[in-house]
Image: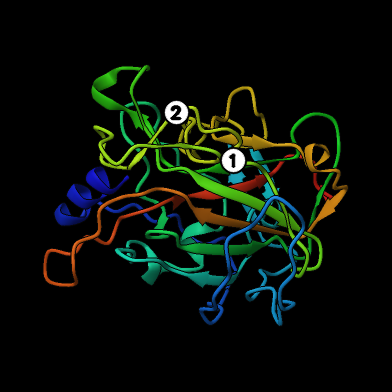
Amino acid sequence: MARALGALAAAGLVAVLASPTGCGSPSASPSSTGDAGDVPETGPAPTTDGGALPADASYSIGDASVSASRFVTGVVAFSPGACAGFGADSMPGIVEGPPVGGGSSHGSTDVVSLGNAGTIVVSFAPNAIVDGPGPDFIVFENPFWIDGDPGGIYAEPGEVSVSDDGVTWQTYPCTPTYDPSASDGTGTEPPYGSCAGWHIVYSSPSNGISPFDPATAGGDAFDLADLGVTHARYVRIVDKTMESCPEAGPDEPTTNGFDLDAVAIVNAEQP
């Protein structure tokens, strides 16, 4: 969402969701994570869950109190790509907790921008995603309808992978159509396959729409069964846009790439 975020950032209009009471979550040190492939891949095991939130932490959503571990509780790794930086100073809190959906007219600014080909790995400790009925988790980005046209979605797709040990990853097939001349400047066009980042986000703490209902929350829902997976403690997202990134300088954008707002567990090991 480089265009919209850039304008909002310049105006100082950046919304940051407050951390739940009693929570303190230090950032994990940045580390490099490679692109996922079509087959399981391996890498070094995480040495931390990114500073997991206290087990009794919770968020208020409508009239309900929801465990913080139904959302991201820690950033295990963050390897930003070129022209990233938006929201990074507020990590990890900016990707923890429920989504702050902006609806179809504008995207949320409660996000961190991954930059071109950037990567983020998040955890839900002490919770985990389990395979249950229907979709098991939802990834929330910040797409919107260009000029209010539902046929023109401003989307910055990202590839989603899951892992139970942080070493072996299974990947959903993210297959955007690459077009350097795409009118929205992202370098991609639909169809997007099983990418995250192209469905409008409606759920927000301000409207009470449940972030756990794939039918109303918006965002991009994923089913572990599609990968033959039954249990996952980590989610990895890799930016798959092809946005222009000028050379470093005062005008270099910081909003390129996939913009992560939140991840919600629909089917959780711990309710």
Instruction: Identify the residue at the far left of this view.
Output: 250
- Say left or right for 258 vs 105: right
Residue 209 found in image quarter: top right
Q: Could you say which is closer to the camera, residue 18 or residue 253? A: 253
Residue at 53% x, 42% y: name it. 140
Q: Which residue is mark 2?
A: 190
Distance Cα–Cα, label 2 vs label 1: 33 Å
- Closer to viewer: mark 2 or mark 1: 2
Q: Could you say which is closer to the camera, residue 64 or residue 32? A: 32
Q: Could you say which is closer to the camera, residue 22 or residue 27? A: 27
Q: Which residue is mark 1?
A: 61
Mark 1 is surrounded, within 10 Å at the Cα level, by few (under 14), some (14 to 19) or many (20 or more) other residues, namely some
Residue at 58% x, 41% y: name it. 174
Q: How is the image coloured?
A: rainbow
Residue at 32% x, 42% y: name it. 186
- Does residue 130 sit above or below 57 in this rendering? above
* SS state under label 1: strand
Residue 44 drawn at (x, y percent) = 72, 78
Residue 248 drawn at (x, y percent) = 19, 72
- Say left or right for 109 vs 19: left
Mark 2 is surrounded, within 10 Å at the Cα level, by few (under 14), some (14 to 19) or many (20 or more) other residues, namely some
Indicate the amino acid at tag 1.
Answer: Ile
Residue 145 found in image quarter: top left
How many numbered circles does the render carry?
2
* SS state under label 2: loop
- Does residue 13 sit above or below 195 in this rendering? below
Indicate the amino acid at tag 2.
Answer: Pro
* Mark 2 and mark 1 residues within 8 Å of each other at the beta carbon: no
Nearest to N terminus: mark 2 or mark 1: 1
Residue 161 drawn at (x, y percent) = 67, 53
- Quarter holding the N terminus is top left
